[in-house]
Image (cartoon, rainbow, N blue to C red):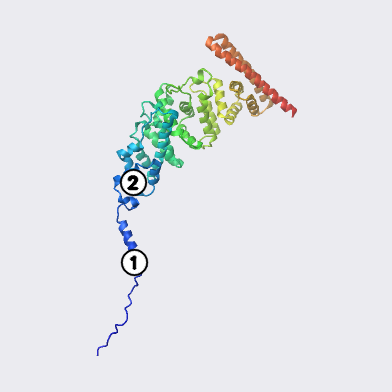
């Protein structure tokens, strides 16, 4: 007899279907659907055609676009593609480098700030590329603008192109380590053939390649040196420029880059330091560059290196007037001035050092600097001499140097033409007053020492 099966109870399923399970199942399906979308990393932009996305970019500032480029790889790639379009190129690569109509150079600061922001955009867009590939891509884009090239502009003195390139480069490389910055400099040298151009001017007669001297000065100043906020960065790039060359060529390059120029055409004035006394403005750039190398503690530069560079500089292209040499030392600061003079004392050049003291006093008199500074500098240098006899001879040399220089100026007054006579007489006037004030400070110092 067949048994009867009780069907009055409910069968228990193998797995309970709870609401939470249903919800997770729905979420899984949605994720799978989302992953299947080719533009999923665009987020809400995935519903927009690419053309609309690029129209939106037109309403964003360059800084905002650089922030947007870091959202995802896909958005980053779309921005890179937009930069390469004709509308993107026109938007980003502004070329109003010669507009001098607005007062206070407001237009200048606006375009410089634009290229600073553009450097940040390119830095973020190319973040995942190796340095060499980044530089190649950036060059490919910027090559469309002739004023950003070494020889690209026909009126370089009135052009902001290289300054904009410098702002771009500063923003691009900010925070990079020295090795990466080395690669950037090498890339720029290869791109512009800069080393060969420098070789041409350092081995040719000064002033024989005036246009090339001007181009090198503008490129080095506007692209590599002038836009850094930290002095150590400026010192790094200046070191890259100078260190490959022997000391004599370093001095020549330093004069080309920072020396006095004609305000009309920007040409380097090679005879400025040789023919007549100059003013502070002609030497300020050189003094600041020397202080930059001395004060920032760059490992490639020792104190002896900098002093040797100053010594070489004082004969570029020929020996300077000693007054100009003294003025450069004063502008370079106490440490460099004392180290330079101490070097002469150690090397037995006491007579030359004594004449330098005279012209330090003369510059102090002309510029109304405190004469006690010159006296205290002489006192400090005296301590470098090892024996009392050497110190006594040095002080006698200083007294003799004042007399000799005064006689030299008197002779030039008696033998010179009228214009030369006027300049020499004025120089004599300042020198006599300098001698009087110098000896007055010596007497004060002596009396103070005796009273203590």
Q: Name the residue under label 2.
A: 77
> CB under 8 Å between callouts 2 and 1?
no
Q: Judge left or right: residue 293 versus residue 84.
A: right
Q: Outermost residue, left direction? A: 1
What residue do we see at 53% from left, 26% from top?
Answer: 311
Quadrant location of the N terminus?
Answer: bottom left
Gap in Å between the C-alphas at discs 2 and 1? 38 Å
Q: Residues within 10 Å of mark 1 (few under 14, many from 20)?
A: few
The residue singled out by tag 1 in the image is 22
Q: In the displayed structure, would residue 10 be above or below residue 176? A: below
Instruction: Say whether disc 2 or disc 1 marks the residue closer to the N-terminus.
Output: 1
Identify the residue shown where x is 36% and y is 42%.
59
The residue nearer to you, when weighing 166 against 181, is: 166
User: Going by the image, does 55 lie left or right of 327?
Assistant: left
Q: Work out which quarter of the rendered image holds the C terminus and state it.
A: top right
| Residue 242 in view (yes/no) | yes
Q: Residue at x 39, y 24 (%)?
A: 211
Residue 175: % across, % down: 46, 42
């Amino acid at each position: 007899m067949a048994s009867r099966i009780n069907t009055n109870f409910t069968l228990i399923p193998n797995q309970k279907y709870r609401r939470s399970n249903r919800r997770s199942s729905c979420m899984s399906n949605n994720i799978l659907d989302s992953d299947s979308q080719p533009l999923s990393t665009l987020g809400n932009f995935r519903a927009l055609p690419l053309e609309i996305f690029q129209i939106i970019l037109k309403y964003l500032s360059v800084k905002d676009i650089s922030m947007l480029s870091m959202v995802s790889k896909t958005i980053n790639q779309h921005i890179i593609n937009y930069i390469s379009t004709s509308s993107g190129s026109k938007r980003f690569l502004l070329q109003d480098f010669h507009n001098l109509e607005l007062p206070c150079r407001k237009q200048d600061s606006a375009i410089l700030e634009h290229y600073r922001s553009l450097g940040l955009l390119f830095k973020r867009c190319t973040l995942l590329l190796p340095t060499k590939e980044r530089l190649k891509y950036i060059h490919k884009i910027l090559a469309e603008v002739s004023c950003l090239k070494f020889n690209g502009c026909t009126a370089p003195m009135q052009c902001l192109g290289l300054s904009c390139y410098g702002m771009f480069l500063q923003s691009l490389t900010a925070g990079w380590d020295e090795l990466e910055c080395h690669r950037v400099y090498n890339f720029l040298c290869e791109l512009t053939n800069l080393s060969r151009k420098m070789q041409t001017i350092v081995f040719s007669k000064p002033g024989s390649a005036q246009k090339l001297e001007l181009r090198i000065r503008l490129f080095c100043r506007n692209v590599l040196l002038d836009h850094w906020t930290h002095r150590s960065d400026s010192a790094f790039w200046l070191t890259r420029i100078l260190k490959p060359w022997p000391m004599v060529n370093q001095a020549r390059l330093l004069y080309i880059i920072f020396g006095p120029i004609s305000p009309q055409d920007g040409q380097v004035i090679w005879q400025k330091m040789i023919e007549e006394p100059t003013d502070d403005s002609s030497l300020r750039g050189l003094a600041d560059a020397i202080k930059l190398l001395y004060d920032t503690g760059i490992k490639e530069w020792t104190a002896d290196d900098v002093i040797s560079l100053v010594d070489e500089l004082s004969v570029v292209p020929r020996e300077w007037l000693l007054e100009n040499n003294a003025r450069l030392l004063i502008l370079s600061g106490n440490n460099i001035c004392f180290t330079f003079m101490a070097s002469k004392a150690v090397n037995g050049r006491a007579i030359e050092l004594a004449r330098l003291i005279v012209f330090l006093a003369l510059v102090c008199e002309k510029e109304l600097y405190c004469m006690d500074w010159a006296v205290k500098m002489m006192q400090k240098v005296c301590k470098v001499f090892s024996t009392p006899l050497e110190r006594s001879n040095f002080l006698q040399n200083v007294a003799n140097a004042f007399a000799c220089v005064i006689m030299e100026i008197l002779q030039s007054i008696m033998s010179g033409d009228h214009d030369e006579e006027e300049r020499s007489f004025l120089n004599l006037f300042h020198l006599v007053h300098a001698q009087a004030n110098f000896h007055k400070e010596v007497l004060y110092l002596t009396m103070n020492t005796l009273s203590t």
